[in-house]
Image: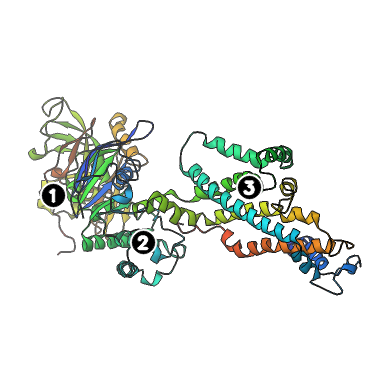
Amino acid sequence: MAAITLEHVVKRYGDGYPAVNDVSLQIADGEFMILVGPSGCGKSTLLRMIVGLEDVTDGEVRIGERVVNDVPPRDRNLAMVFQNYALYPHLTVFENIAFPLRLRQRPAGEVRQRVEEAAAVLELTEHLDRKPSQLSGGQRQRVAMGRAIVREADAYLYDEPLSNLDAQLRGQMRTEIARLQGRLGVTTVYVTHDQVEAMTLGDRVAVLRKGVLQQVDTPRALYERPVNLFVAGFIGSPSMNLVPATLEGRRLRLPFVEFDLPPAAIPPTSGPDGPDGTPMALVAGLRPEHFEDAALVAPAVRERGVTFEVKVEVVEWLGAEQYAYVPYGAQAEMVEPLHRLAAELDRESARLLLVASIDPASRIRRGDPAHLWFDPARVYLFDAATGDSLRPPTLDGHVPEYQDPAGH
Amino acid sequence: MGRVRILKVTGPVLIAVWTLVPLLWLVSLSLKGGDHINDGRFWPTAPTLRNYRTVFRTDLFTSALRNSIGISVIATVLSVVLATLAAYAIARLDFPGKKLILSVALGIAMFPTISLVGPLFDIWRSVGLYDTWPGLVIPYLSFTLPLSIWTLTAFFREIPWEMEQAAQVDGATPWQAFRKVIVPLAAPGVFTAAILTFFFAWNDFVFGISLTSTGRARTVPAALAFFTGASQFEQPTAAIAAAAVVVTIPVVAIVLVFQRRIVAGLTSGAVKG
């Protein structure tokens, strides 16, 4: 068990391009840290530098108190689960799990006991004599985990361990990993591009973009107080609606509605065009789940928020959730930064389409005019040029209230 | 459809007859007594093991057999060990001249053997390698190494690098990772290379006859040419046939024993799939 510390870590490849750029990160003893970001953001490279499979170009990697920059992987005492599992196909499941112990020349009795313990935890006992080729994807994944937990490693590293599994199995294994971590309480670093895994598993989540650390915080804090457009667009599902907007005084103009911001939500520093001057171009962020069908919101609450008329293009009813899609128009030059961001987030392009997650009881139908409601205090504002958050909205655990249609 | 079926059945039968009849003839010949060799019958009328007793009693054959086994085994072991290390380096490391090594190796493998016999004969005579075991092991090595390196490089390239990295993280030194993970995974390739090398050395006639002069290093294929019959008045045909059967047995045995290991696909299941 050990803490892992990264200080100003840089990884440069032959072409001089920094795959990881000046990352400093402290992972506490026993903490579950998630490294998340779109493909090519350097998260796997960072993990491989911690485990020792990639050289550190600059900076320092410490495990506990020990600087490990030049320590070969075998002497770092870390266990890793690879994306492709990297099981040894010529060995049985038993020998795969026993492999690290055999290398350490542990007595046969101890090897047997520990492998059987690990197999029991992972429900692999009946498969111990099989070869990896005879196992299903989920079973192989568990063998890879067995090979990690059989050791008394200082930390466990996971490199997108669930990305090769189908959706159902992924959910199951996710729970399994959470259970295992809770049971072992070992420092864990987990790389994923899946934000559901990031949000559900991590004590803290580190969001990376092009090799640069954007924000490190608890999942809740990332969701509630993203520091920039990138984090805001990445965390949350469906992702935050990012809408071109202008601010004049406290008047916020969105393509589909305009309203006055509550005093607490007005950005304190507002760039060259202050709130008192000319209109300031910015990007407004509205989470789909902060919208509601106005017809379902209690009148008292409704007054506190903003209601606007829309023409719904598509409605998706999923039983527990319902999504309404509303197209809107905006000037091309205002949408430009959003297109760039969409490309970075591996999305096709920024669509001028508002997504609202409304109560499943809502009777809004496709093509019908309808009214949507939201709380202006929950609007996020970002600088259009830099993408930095201008001010986190005032949340304080406040949840919009609306009339429960079921009458609870 | 019927046509395809007929082809499917008759094709293999034809090939089997084509390849096996000469072998059967050889066996039949080796079982015939001295007078029956020219009797014009396919099957021996009075099968006898006399020819086998004869070949094993002649020094010419037994020493040649000893030489053949020794030289082939040494050439095979050396070739496989060297080729494994070379192929691993080519597959895994980045160093200047990597492509050159591979193409030069291929060029050497294409070289006609007979063109080397004359120069080698002269060189071996002056450096004292003529009629010695190393005198044959060296040319066998230089002709089989390229093929072994190519075969094994292809195998090593197919082994996911993650396999080795996993071993390193699990606590293996580079040598342990190579020995415990990479070599077992490349086993089909190693066996293929070993068998090709062994057969090349075992079956070689050109070097064997040209670079040897006595029983010190003469191999079986070369020695067969020097056979005489059971008595000096007899044709040695039947004895040669018996010797030929004896040297064919190891080849058949090796293929039967190792054919399972030659089958590739051992790596399936290593990664997702």
Residues at marks 2 and 3, CA–CA distance in whole angstroms:
40 Å
A52 w.r.t. A18: above or below: below
Q: Residue at x 50, y 42 (%)?
A: B90
Q: Residue at x 30, y 36 (%)?
A: A57
Q: Is residue A68 in view?
A: yes
Q: Which mark is residue A102?
A: 2
Q: Return the x and y of residue B252 as percentages of the image width and height.
A: 68, 63
Please say if the residues under marks 2 and 3 sit with CB atoms less than 8 Å apart: no
Q: Amino acid at mark 3?
A: Pro
Judged left or right of residue A182, residue B130 is right
Q: Return the x and y of residue B117 as percentages of the image width and height.
A: 72, 41
Q: Residue at x 73, y 64 (%)?
A: B246
Q: Return the x and y of residue B62 as percentages of the image width and height.
A: 71, 61
Query: What quarter of the picture does the C terminus of chain A occupy?
Result: bottom left
Query: What quarter of the picture does the N terminus of chain A occupy?
Result: bottom left
Please report, as a chain letter, where disc 3 is located. B
A157 w.r.t. A173: above or below: above
The residue under label 3 is B134
The residue under label 1 is A302
Q: Is residue B17 in view?
A: no
